[in-house]
Image (cartoon, grey):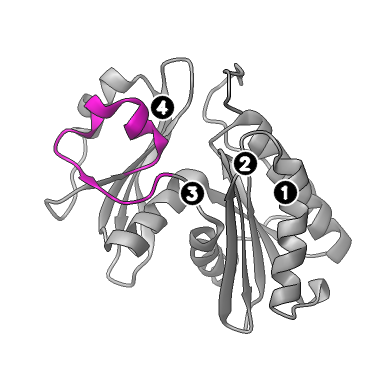
Amino acid sequence: MTNILAIDTSTEACSVALMFNNELSSDFAISQRDHTKQILPMIDNLLKAANCPLSQIDAIAFAKGPGSFTGVRIGIGIAQGLALGLDKPMIGVSTLKALAQGAYRVKGASRIITAIDARMGEVYLGAYQVTDEGNVQLMMEECVIKPELVSNHLASFSFTENITYYAGTGWSTYPDMMIGLKDGGTLLPKAEDMLIIAKQEYINGNLIAVQDVEAAYLRNEVTWKKLPGRE
């Protein structure tokens, strides 16, 4: 039995989830600017509600991005601090993949295009297909791209089924991209979906030492522009 704590502050949301004794619990809140104030109490409350001592955690899963530059760093920093104190490994989960897992959970979507608003007229983009075993599989290298180039970019590969769903904030920011796609019912990544991915990564032995953790920004040179009312 594997006990995993998942933490995500990579977008406008604060999200935590716990797999303890094969039972999943989670908490989620929209948080535009106070991730650092909200996330630790959320973790503490979740552990207490599940009667889970922190010492019983086997691994810490974290959202590695892409997403808000500040948000990704906050989540990684907190996850690293917990993992270091516990002397436990870490598991990095793509926020784009977590969105795809969410669309599978909510809509039963078997193929999903995920997009997160990357600011500066771009989106972070990923394409996934769900296997017969229920695992979300990457079909195309995650990238940062101009919205007007998305259609041609996606035309370079194919799925095994016809219906394709979309998930993430990129589609509401650039609605012209969603032509021909169905709503996957998932706007922001959630830690409960990260947990499903993290559990499989743990089984596969894809663990990361605290000192080796890296964020996935996708841009070669990280540029971050703070917009009014957004992180």
Q: Nearer the viewer, mark 2 or mark 3?
A: 2
The answer to whether the residues at label 1 and label 2 have Cβ atoms under 8 Å apart is: yes
Circle 3 SS class: loop
Asked whether residue 57 is in view, the answer is no
**Residue 170, x across and y down, in percent:** 38, 32
- The part of the chain drawn in magenta is 167-187
Q: Which residue position holds label 2?
A: 31
Give the Cα distance between marks 2 and 4.
21 Å
Which amino acid type is marked by label 2?
Answer: Ser
Q: Which residue position holds label 3?
A: 189
Of mark 1 and mark 2, the one earlier in the sequence is: 2
Circle 2 SS class: loop
**Residue 48, x across and y down, in percent:** 76, 74
Of mark 3 and mark 4, the one earlier in the sequence is: 4
**Residue 175, x across and y down, in percent:** 27, 28
Q: Which residue position holds label 4?
A: 123
Which amino acid type is marked by label 3?
Answer: Pro
Vertical order, 71 against 223 (above or below): below
Residue 121 left/right relative to 148: right
Q: Which residue position holds label 1?
A: 38
Q: Nearer the viewer, residue 54 or 87?
A: 54
Rendered residue at 61%/21% (across/down)? 222
**Residue 87, x across and y down, in percent:** 84, 64
Of mark 2 and mark 4, the one earlier in the sequence is: 2
Circle 1 SS class: helix
Which amino acid type is marked by label 4?
Answer: Val
Q: Nearer the viewer, residue 104 or 229?
A: 229
The answer to whether the residues at label 2 and label 4 have Cβ atoms under 8 Å apart is: no
Q: Nearer the viewer, mark 3 or mark 4?
A: 3
